[in-house]
Image: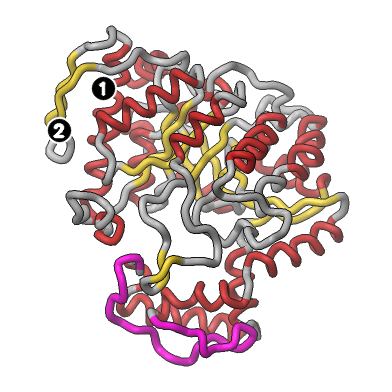
Amino acid sequence: MTTSRRIQFGVFFQGVNFGTIWSSDRSGSQYDFESFRRIAQTAERGLFSAFFLGEGLRLREHFGRIHDLDIAGRPDAQTQLAALAAVTERIGLVATQNTTYNDPYDLAKRLNSLDLLSEGRAGWNIVTTDNAWTGANFRRGGYLEHADRYRRAAQFVAAAQRLWDAGADGVGTPVRVGDQLVSFEGPAPLPPSAQGRPVLFQAGDSDEGREFAAASADVIFSGHPGLEDAVAFAADVRRRLPRHGRTEDDLKFFPGAQFILAETDAEAREKAEWVTRAQVSPQTAIRFLEPIWGRDLSEFDADGPLPDIDPVVDEVDGQRGSLFQGRRAVETAREWRESAAAEGLSIREFVMKRSSLRTFVGGYSTIADLVQKYVEAGAVDGFNVSPYLVPEGLDDIVDGLIPELQERGVYPAEYVGTTLRENLGLPGVGERAELAA
């Protein structure tokens, strides 16, 4: 069967997480350039549309100590992407950059620089932050009120776009921005790249986040890889596009997913068991619960039932998110305890189950069948793959799954262009402006 629709892949080289098995003797280093080079070049060999780096502005901590169960520290994402631009030719280069603790003029110039140096392959994953815990790393400190996160982000992105567009009129074209949360005056620092300006990615799932993506993003990452959820999520965001003067062609959908593959379904299931148990060690399982309970749970057995005590209601530290505070933590703990008891799950088994919801497990042919269903449903434009091993975690996809998809006509046989915008099938900057006018 052939179809005019195609699926694409991006790779998500995560920062702090327990999805990547850093403890394996097959894992590379989170510092060495070789890890980044190998996985980016493997992805490019598989015609992936983008290589995406997560970025954090503060080292992950756990009850005031550096978290040591995954990785602690990694080189700056923009610096890594600039290095990768020299050893790749077609794959897009995308990194998370924060609108709360960056300044628009400086960040717009850095993104524009990467876009020029890579000949039109740069992307920006737009994120916001509202906590003082991260803000403590910055001179001005403090934080944004939750309600102002997306207001600043919208003004930030609009300001960056004004700088990029002004560059088309010539370097030095004056730009003045005087919004409430973003204000500067300066000349356009650089001309546009081959794709006009960097591609904008966004991953918010709240109502505000979906609206922001509908207004400003070119690609939206989501946590909805299940087929029905993916269809519903895309439908919700797409219905918002017209009020921002946009069409369905202006926004691509890439849910995050993990793929565990083998020649047969049985072999894939066996591999998935090893992967999940390696991802969720007993210590990881206990620490997974501790932000909810707000206290040290090391006295509990990871192979025993969930703690039968109530969480600490008061805020413990700045990294304990709003979902884990107060009565919400008590309610969440009760729901988790009841769910685990009903299914007879230990702490570790419960965490393993919760952490495997975004995983596609099966033989190459089985997963190709599943991906084909997504293509036919028009649910997604691609998947943002989180490899469970670095740097070899994409090998099964590139060498086993992609050839199967190409035979079915549902995966590209070559890159269609030289820029990220072209390879994602997005309209050019000028075309989008005409549609929105």
> Residue 68, relative to residue 348: is it above or below?
above
Q: Which mark is residue 183?
A: 2
Q: In percent of the image, x 50 and y 33: which residue is there? A: 81
Residue 74 x %, y %: 48, 49
- Which residue is painted at 75% across and 65% down in the image? 274
The image's colouring method is: secondary structure
Note whether residue 238 is visible. no
In the image, 128: left or right of 421? Answer: left
**Secondary structure under badge 2?**
strand
Q: In which quadrant of the rendered image does the N terminus lie?
A: top right
Residue at the spot of label 1 = 162
Q: Residue at x 38, y 41 (%)?
A: 97
Tell me whether the residue at label 1 lies in contact with that at label 2, contact meaning CB atoms closer than 8 angstroms.
Answer: no
What is the three-letter code of the residue carrying label 1?
Arg
Q: Nearer the viewer, residue 418 or 364?
A: 418
Task: Give neighbour class at mark 2: few <14, some 14-19, many 20+ (Cα, 10 Å).
Answer: some
Residue range corresponding to the magenta coloring: 295-319
At label 2, the amino acid type is Ser
- Percent x, y of residue 437: 30, 17
Dot 1 alpha-carbon crowd within 10 angstroms: few under 14, some 14 to 19, many 20 or more: some
Outermost residue toward the front? 32
Percent from the top left, x then y, of residue 150? 27, 45
Q: Is 343 one of the magenta-colored residues?
A: no
Secondary structure, magenta segment, majority class: loop
Q: Nearer the viewer, mark 1 or mark 2?
A: 2
Q: Nearer the viewer, residue 253 or 159?
A: 159
Q: Which numbered marker is on residue 209?
A: none
